[in-house]
């Protein structure tokens, strides 16, 4: 399965994550209203700290995932959407 990953916020430097969690919920809701299947995840990186991402998908076909990636990137605030394999 393929997923389009959308980074919805910057690193969580506060360590609390509430503000970033709220942004995730808003992004999941917004993309869901547009018909996308979404979920969010908190990602921890040794070099970048804690990040929150919203995922669109999964997709069985790579071409369909690429088409949705292009559509999502056109939405305000999602220009950094990247295709990732989970």
Image (cartoon, rainbow, N blue to C red):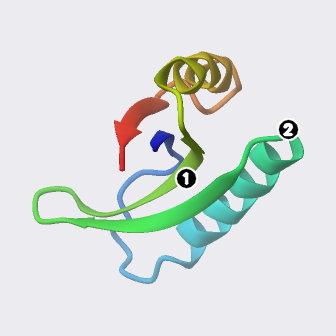
- Earlier sequence position, callout 1 versus callout 2: 2
Residue at numbered disc 2: 34
Residue at numbered disc 1: 54
Res 28 quadrant in image: bottom right
Where 45 sits versus 37, above or below? Answer: below
Dot 2: element:
loop
Side (left or right) of 85 relative to 52? left
Q: Residue 39 in the image: x percent, y percent?
A: 61, 60
Q: Residue 16 in the image: x percent, y percent?
A: 44, 83
Residue found 76% across the figure and 44% down from its top: 31
Taking depth in this image into account, of 22 and 2 the one nearest to the observer is: 2
Where 30 sits versus 79, above or below? Answer: below
- Mark 2: few/some/many CA within 10 Å (<14, 14-19, 20+): few
Residue found 71% across the figure and 25% down from its top: 75
Residue found 56% across the figure and 24% down from its top: 69
Dot 1: element:
strand
- Mark 1: few/some/many CA within 10 Å (<14, 14-19, 20+): many
Find the residue positioned furthest to the front: 60
Side (left or right) of 75 relative to 34? left
Q: Residue 84 in the image: x percent, y percent?
A: 37, 38
Taking depth in this image into account, of 23 and 13 the one nearest to the observer is: 23
Where 63 sits versus 85, above or below? Answer: above
Residue found 71% across the figure and 49% down from its top: 37
What distance separates the C-alpha of mark 1 from that of mark 2? 14 Å
Q: Residue 36 in the image: x percent, y percent?
A: 75, 42
């Amino acid at each position: 399965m393929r997923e389009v990953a959308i980074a919805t916020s910057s690193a969580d430097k506060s360590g609390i994550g509430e503000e970033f969690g709220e942004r995730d919920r808003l992004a999941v809701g917004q993309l869901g209203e547009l018909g996308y299947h979404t979920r969010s995840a908190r990602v921890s990186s040794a070099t970048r700290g804690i990040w929150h991402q919203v995922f669109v998908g999964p997709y069985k076909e790579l071409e369909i995932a690429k088409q949705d990636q292009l559509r999502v990137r056109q939405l305000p605030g999602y220009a950094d959407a990247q295709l990732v394999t989970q």
